[in-house]
Image: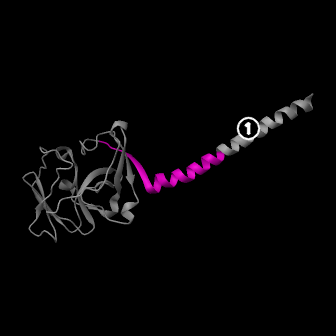
Amino acid sequence: MVDLEEKRESPNRKEFLSFFGEVVKIVIISLAIIIPVRYYLFQPFFVKGASMEPTFNDGDYVLIDEVSYSFRDPQRGEVIIFRSPQDHSQFFIKRVIGLPGEQIQVKDNKVLIYNKQNSEGFILDESEYLDSDTETLGNLRINIDDNEYFVLGDNRLHSSDSRLWGGVNRSLVTGRVLLRAWPINKIAKFEPIEYPLP
């Protein structure tokens, strides 16, 4: 009787071991795909604070494209994640306003940009992402180094940004916001902004 019971249990044991082996293979393959994607291609971040409202709210979950900037530089209007110039352990989310080598002036609630193509300067059209009544407080004129970016929060009255601590070094930039993944009713992909020629 013992021999018969062992023979009956043996197929079940083989099926279980086969099933368990398949599960292990699936887990290993999944990790081999997910881990590189998570750590080297697209990284998730939770937005903290109100500095990017109404574009991003506190608690929004965004995916960061960490690959694009290996092949090209950040563009004006893109929303980026970067390490704080004052405390490298903190990450900030802001919008790129000024590019390397430009001069930025904040005056009368407007942002003016001076560069090689526009030596007289032009007022940056921010109507695509700012409300018409948004105030950009400050009175400054700053030269951006060749490896730095001038960044501002969309919620200008509640944003610690380049108006306070200057440009952000290219080496501190983690990547650009590619997708808002949470909340579900606000899922959106973010494309570079096409600015009208000044």
- Give coordinates of residue 125: x percent, y percent: 15, 55
Q: Which residue is the extreme one toward the top?
A: 1
- Work out whether residue 154 or residue 194 is closer to the camera in this orientation and state it: 194
Q: Which residue is the extreme one toward the bottom?
A: 116
The residue positioned 11% from the left and 54% from the top of the image is 110
Q: Which amino acid does label 1 sit on?
A: Phe
Magenta span of residues: 24-48
The secondary structure that most of the magenta stretch takes on is helix
**As drawn, is 94 to the left or to the right of 42?**
left
**As drawn, is 84 to the left or to the right of 138?**
right
Helix, strand, or loop for circle 1?
helix
Instruction: Verify whether residue 173 appears in magenta.
Output: no
Is 33 placed above or below 122 here? above
The residue positioned 36% from the left and 62% from the top of the image is 69
The residue positioned 31% from the left and 64% from the top of the image is 73
Is 11 placed above or below 97 here? above
**As drawn, is 16 to the left or to the right of 48?**
right
The residue positioned 25% from the left and 45% from the top of the image is 52
Number of marks in the image? 1
**As drawn, is 44 to the left or to the right of 186?**
right
